[in-house]
Image (tube, grey):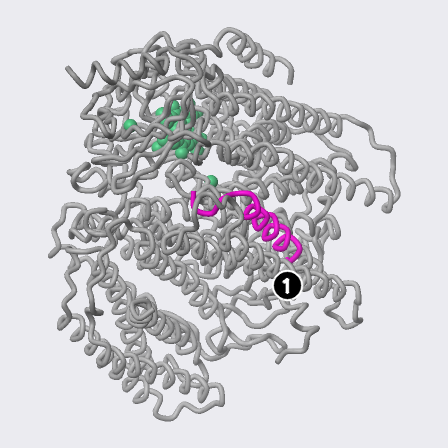
Amino acid sequence: MMPSLTLPSLIITLSLLSGCSGPQSILNPAGPSALAVSRLWWGMFGFSVAVLLAVMALWIYAMRRNPRSLTEAQADRINRNWIIGGGLVLPIVGIVALLSFGIPMGYRMLPLPVAGQQALRIDVIGHQWWWEVRYPDTDIVLINELHLPAGTPVDIHVTSSDVIHSFWVPRLAGKLDMVPGRTNVLRIEADAPGQFLGKCAEFCGVGHAHMMLEIEVHTPEDFESWLETYEYE
Amino acid sequence: MWPRETLLYHPMQLAFGLAIWILWFIVKYGALALFCEQAPPPIEQGAFTWINAALMVGSVAVTALLLFWANNCWRAARSGNNDADSEINAFIAVLGAGINLLGAVVTLSQGLMSLLLPPCL
Amino acid sequence: MNTNNETRKAEAALHDEFLKVWGNPRGWRALTIVNHTTVGIRFMITGGIFFLIGGLLAMLMRTQLALPEQEIIEPKLYDQLFTMHGTVMMFLFAVPVLEGLAMYLIPKMIGARDLVFPRLSAFGYWCYLFGSLILMSSLVLGIAPAAGWFMYTPLTNDVYSPGPNVDFWLLGVTFIEISAVSAGIELTVSILRTRTSGMALLHMPLFCWYILIMALMIVFGFPPLILGSILLELERAAGMPFFDVARGGDPILWQHLFWLFGHPEVYIIFLPAAGIVSTLLPVFSRQPIVGYRWIVLAIISTGFISFGLWVHHMFTIGIPQLAQAFFSMASMLVAIPTGIQLFAWLATLWTGRPVYHVPMLWLVGFLFIFMIGGLTGVMLALVPFNWQVHDTHFVVAHLHYVMVGGMLFPLIAGLYYWLPHFSGRMPSDKLARWGFWMTFVGFNTTFLVMHLTGLLGMPRRVYTYPAGLGWELPNSVSSMGGFIMAMGISMVLLDIVLHFRFGRPAGANPWQADTLEWATDTPPQPYNFISLPDCPMRHPMWDSPDLQATIADGRHGLSEIDHGRRETWGSDPVSGAIREIIHLPGNSWLPFFSALALSGLCISLLIRTYSMALIAVIASLVLLLRWSWKNGAFLEADSDSAAKSGYPQLHSRTFDGPGLWGMVVTLLADGALFLSILFGWLYLRIVAPNWQAPETVPLAWQPLLISGVLLTIATFWHHFIVRRLREGRDDHLQGQLWSIAVVGLVHCGVLIWTWSASSLLATQTAHDAVISVILMYQLFHSGLAVIMTALQAMRVAYGYVDKGAPYEIAVVKPWWLYTTAVYWLSFLTVILLPIAWRSA
Ligand code: HEM
Ligand SMILES: [Cu+2]
Ligand SMILES: [Cu+2]
């Protein structure tokens, strides 16, 4: 058992320590949605490793151990305990725990009305293989770049002009598909100004691998002035 | 009409509980889509809409039905009438109890979701 | 000593006589073989070859991804590679191999001599082989499908995928699915109706439960995809807009139809593999499986629940979160049956006295890998997490942990376990261990880090990636691991090849197993058992260790062969009590040529030569009719049905023989297809963004009503005939059957007339396209009902069918009923519902 596990686990720990910080990494969140998911991941990861190790250990121990001879009744009781404990209690506890985090979290990611504030709306339209970004109420149309204000909830209205694409900025929020004929709304928010990468996440043909989106997050003031200067150009 | 006993020992019990669940699921999913298309409630109501209420009531009713059946099967399995088929009868009735119970668990736990989330968002 | 010799001589003589009836021909006539042992092995070997091809494609992909910004493989080819890898692994490897194993084992485990529809097994194999060859030829020609194994529209419609690439997938895979569904039907009926005397449901080996549920899942799960493929092909070839938003279709409908199939598919693959685990573990633990009933409960509930999860593949398409939560919940609840099985296995080890052999190694590997796959599966079922990692390499890692852990490892464990059964020899220990460790280490090196690659944001289905995103190291590690795994697999193969020459002879029941398949010879004879034992118990080989000898002696049931028929028991589905003797058909060219004709159809549709397609359709129809002609009381099955006093009748003398069961299970699959059509109809009506329905229903309802009444009359009439046959009356049988056929024909005529007089424009709106499909479906069923009834009328004339042999007429009855039910249901949803809708 041992030699096989050490190598991959060594690699995974090493790379986890060094590599979570990639520019497109889910584990390097820069917005509330992504932050919630990355915390969720670490929680689930810990729980899963514990379950995995415990079950593996039990299994291997069960194979090695020398069972004392049992009466049928004793064996039945042991067996039933295993099945009920592991087959019913363990999954049910796990599921309840998971959902009690997951459901409220999903709820908070919805494009709900924001108190006292109108969420900024931006339209993004997918094409084979580029992004068209529009700011309603202005004439601004951008290609493959998206400008956002920091600290403000933004509703991205996504759709597609041809095949299905998927809008995804891993460091800010989860992905949402861009389906022709439909408009889906993704709520995203960036904590601070900076540059981020977006990537089409639904296979859309030969150009899929290169369908990237550059995101520039400004402070709200800079964003306002960007809007204005851009419109005059 | 079949005597109740035979029904509880019928191999149909191996599928009944979960088949009811599937049917209810289809109805529920379809109704949700239909309602949200025809008359979506305002977002501000959150999870407290008549759609959620209807789904919850339906789920509870189906759950109750399945629990009732599970209980019947369980008792039929225990009662052990002494004909030649009793072993196979008990086998089917016990499994039937399990399937009905599981159907109830799945129905209820899915139903509970409609207490938590807005219907059409 | 002397008596011993004599029994041996008698045994050999009996064997020779059995072989005269059951033997397999050699040379080119081997194409006629229908025996389940041969067909099962053919399935497994062919599937194994496709596994190697799929693996090769994977290695090419891993080479390309090993370093960033490589240009070894251009995107056009890479897209074909991952599409074909996924398609080959799922459709050409996983399902057929497991089906093959089931076909090989099931009759032996339930004490039968063959599967219940042997010609169907052979037909399934040829469909699979020809379909796979057609599909693979596209790769050789460089025009393979390139849109991912789930073929999402609109990327796959004729605008964004012109050329035949997608057609190869749609037609080839549908062809292969016909094979899967026929195997599903056959396995279901075999398990339910051909168990040996006294093997009640509660005595069945667990493997049979797993296969039964798998087979039923195929029966219900494949039709949605078959329908989807037909619709998409109609959209591509005939311009009928089911998935085109502008004309009232919806691409999301494809996703629903695909995943309605796709998720159950995963469990169709997992269940037999789990069945292998549940079979092997008790043998190596030296005690019966713990919690038999718990496991049966888990199997059945897995089967059901897996039909309520499909939307978890569609969490990012923007459906309401409440609806997603239903599916999220259901997905997580599958952990319960899986947990029950895992811990039942653990308990079996815990209270048993395990011994170690190579298969056990693969089982431990299975546990580790599958647990990881299951745990990441629960994570993926959580909606917010899914939104982040969906369609990234995290999912690629997850699906390989599930597929390789939940299918490949148990499969190899099973292969090692049943190897002595296939060949009569034992595998080597040393090479086998090396093979395992290389595969295990290689697999985990490839895919464990791939979770991280995904979390670092690498999407799936990209042919290359830029440097500097932190993906270089994990990708190189994955590629290295891939090659280690490939070496491991080659060692396993080498071991298996070598063992045929160098393996030491296995002897009888080498693992001291408990199930009946070890009571055959190793390797087995085509007839499996000379005599069929009573088996009212779960562990026949443990309870009566001399079973193999007494079976070979002919001391149990049905050991007569002088009548020259292939026979096996037909028994009660619940109690296993004997009901009839099933007379099985022998070797035949029909399956081969029917499959050949169908592949002709497939190819002519592919190159869009419709005149050739018509010829192929007629050829297939003629062959299939010839097939049902040679059935039941045809020629060889003469009237001396009760060979020995106390034996039941031949099945052709009964009313609910296996054919009826086959028909009913077929109709279940057919019903699933029809429900998928209705689902599509209602779905488009409710959610398609540009649904366009005309003001008035485009079909005249009066002639439809007349046509329906005619159909109903025909059905009742047929019903009435069967009732009279049951009462032992067959006067005017032939005339009545002809009259029914004529009434059915008039019904079809009225329907066709109504259609042609209607204003339906199938290429203009999805509304009209779906109605046209429903009409086609109806006409297909009505037409077939007419043909089958006419065929039976002719068989009455030849004397193959009468009150003494009423079998086939009873088989046709459910078809009429089904056709009528479909008719009125369609009438309700297409004509009445919209009227009600509009007035509401
Ligand atoms: C021999 C070891 C294997 C390796 C190295 C391997 C590698 C890969 C790679 C690189 C991909 C493409 C991922 C992407 O870009 O999305 C892939 C996809 C896939 N693999 Fe494998 N694979 C292996 C075995 C298997 C097995 C045994 C199965 C199933 C039984 C399987 C089923 C799939 C499926 C269904 C896909 C998805 C295809 C798609 O995206 O359309 N693979 N695999
Ligand atoms: Cu894309
Ligand atoms: Cu799934």
Residue B102 part of the magenta segment: yes
At which x and y percent is residue A40?
56, 25
Residue C283 seen in render: no
Say which quarter of the image contains residue C758.
Answer: bottom left
Q: Is residue B48 left or right of residue C730?
A: right
Residue B107 seen in render: yes
Say which quarter of the image contains residue B79.
Answer: bottom right
- Residue in view at x 18 percent, y 25 percent: A139
Residue C191 part of the magenta segment: no
- Residue in view at x 41 percent, y 25 percent: A153
In this picture, is C821 found above or below B47?
A: below
At which x and y percent is residue C508?
65, 42
**How many numbered tags mark residues here?**
1
Determine the chain carrying the residue at label 1. Answer: B
Secondary structure category for the residue under label 1: helix
- Would the CB of label 1 be found within 8 Å of ligand 3? no
Please state, as top left, top right, bottom left or bottom right, where the C terminus of chain C lies in the image: bottom left
Q: Nearer the viewer, residue C837 or C724?
A: C837
In this picture, is C613 found above or below C419?
A: below
Q: Residues within 10 Å of mark 1 (few under 14, many from 20)?
A: some
In this picture, is A116 found above or below A199?
A: below
Q: Main secondary structure of the magenta part?
A: helix
Q: Is residue C237 left or right of residue C681?
A: left
Say which quarter of the image contains residue A209.
Answer: top left
Magenta residues?
Answer: B100-121
Splitting the image into four quadrants, where does ligand 2 fall? top left
Badge 1 amino acid: Leu
At which x and y percent is residue C336?
63, 42
State the residue position of label 1: B65
At which x and y percent is residue A63?
73, 29
- Residue in view at x 47 percent, y 43 percent: B44
In this picture, is C239 found above or below C145?
A: below
